[in-house]
Amino acid sequence: MYIEQFFVEGLGCASYIVGCEGAGVAAVVDPDRDVRKYLNAAAARGLKITHIVETHLHADHVSGNSDLAALTGASVYVHESAGAGFAHETLRHGDELHLGNVLLKVRHTPGHTPESITLLVVDTTRSDQPWMALTGDTLFVGDAGRPDLVGVEAARGLAGQMHDTLTHEYLTLSDGVMILPGHGAGSLCGKSIGSVLSTTMGYERDTNPALQPRSRDQYIEFAVEGLPEQPGNHKRIKQINRQGPRPLGEVAPKPLSIQDAVRIFQRGAAMLDMRSKEAFKAKHVPGAAHVENDTQLSNRIGFILPPDITIVLLLSDPAEYAEAVYRLARVGYDQVAGYLAESLDAWEALGLPVTAGDVRDIDAAELRDLIEHGNGSKPLVLDVRESWEYAQGHVAGAQLIPLGELSRRLAELNQAQPVAVICASGSRSQSAAALLGRQGFATVYNVVGGMSGWMRQGFPVERGGL
């Protein structure tokens, strides 16, 4: 038997290829948009990919099932309750998928979503008992799948189903079964997913808070309390995955001249400047959105640009183009027209506008000084954490607008007033500050270190909600 895990940093997504080298066949479970790695892994082992299995319809990333199916001829398998609108084979509780000497036993394990399944992996040359469990977004290292990504109104019902799943499916597994989850640290599909990428059922039984004894009602309260922000653009991603993603095809470099880029901008496209923050602040195109091309790009872009907009990239190095396209495509941003092949100096030489400045980083001490001595330039402190985080402690007078709600609540803010954006550590606030800068807010501060830095300095906090 052969099995390999593939992990996407930032999004925290894990996918798998599992198969039988003797029979030369394999399945890919929960593929992400960059399918090259599965093809390369299969080729290196002499395997043909014959099955593509989705443990559920994802809300945090767009699946690569359509590209992989087109390239391999493999069928896509999803649970019968998924309501999938693309060509697929239907799975039911108790079904079995045979891959030579490897057997995948399908268990319907609703709770994160109604259609969630778990695949119990059996190496029939050794035993008829499961060796591993591919758990999707049901059971994680130290956590279980959140119940609210289908819709907040469905959260309590799904939490109840999750309690049933954990009790009647997972807690019946032997301690030695390896747990191979669909997410690790960085994912927003759980509350506190561990950074280790696999575990055992016995260890989770003893240590995972979600598996500790509770009544069904008690578990529901546990599951819906203290949920982090929802992934940006998650409703659209879910819909894309239900309908079937448009095949991304081959990602080849697309250099654009300044003249070509200007024509695209005139049709409503946006520039996404992916250079370093220092380079962006020194010189950039007015109105350009800025997100660095790093592992957090997929998480941040949904809070800054609308998902259906055409994008022209500005890169530090054209060699970064393919990785940038995949990072955007993973969250449904697949209308990338290309990248600007000429420099901003050439842009400026043609008489096209550039600007400098934008968002300024400040620390907690600088924020306190602005609050106490800013006089006419005293900033509004905008807290972009979740309401439960805000209630645990916030800067006095801070206005709460969670990051996931900010783009539709901009009218509540005065663009002429300085705004100091704060979150827990400075990550979400950077995305929020970039959005405000793009929307024309005059003075925007990003509080580096966030509330953690504020409290480490011993500065006063208020507690409770609004």
Image (tube, helix red, strand yellow):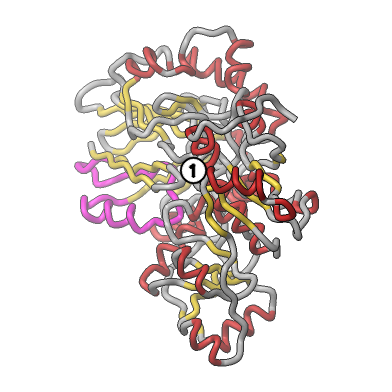
Residue 280 image position (x, y, % from top left): 51, 69
Q: Is residue 51 visible?
A: yes
| Residue under the point 31% across and 40% down | 18
Q: Amino acid at mark 1?
A: Gly
| Residue 34 to residue 448: above or below | below
Q: Which residue is mark 1?
A: 449
Q: Nearer the viewer, residue 399 or 313?
A: 399
Residue 368 image position (x, y, % from top left): 60, 43
| Residue under the point 65% across and 64% down | 438
In the rendered image, residue 372 lying in the magenta stretch gets the answer no
Q: Is residue 242 visible?
A: no
Count of labels shown? Answer: 1
- The quarter of the image holding the C terminus is top right
Q: Secondary structure at mark 1?
A: loop
Residue 287 image position (x, y, % from top left): 64, 70
Q: Nearer the viewer, residue 219 or 276?
A: 276
| Residue 262 to residue 123: above or below | below
On the rendered structure, is 99 left or right of 395? Answer: left
Range of magenta residues: 19-48
On the rendered structure, is 302 left or right of 32? Answer: right
Residue 318 image position (x, y, % from top left): 39, 74
- The quarter of the image holding the N terminus is top left
| Residue 24 to residue 126: above or below | below
On the rendered structure, is 32 left or right of 418? Answer: left
- Residue 205 position by quadrant: top left
In the rendered image, residue 22 lying in the magenta stretch gets the answer yes
Circle 1 packing at 10 Å, graded few (<14), some (14-19), many (20+), is many
| Residue under the point 70% across and 45% down | 405
Q: Nearer the viewer, residue 377 or 18?
A: 377
| Residue under the point 59% across and 76% down | 355
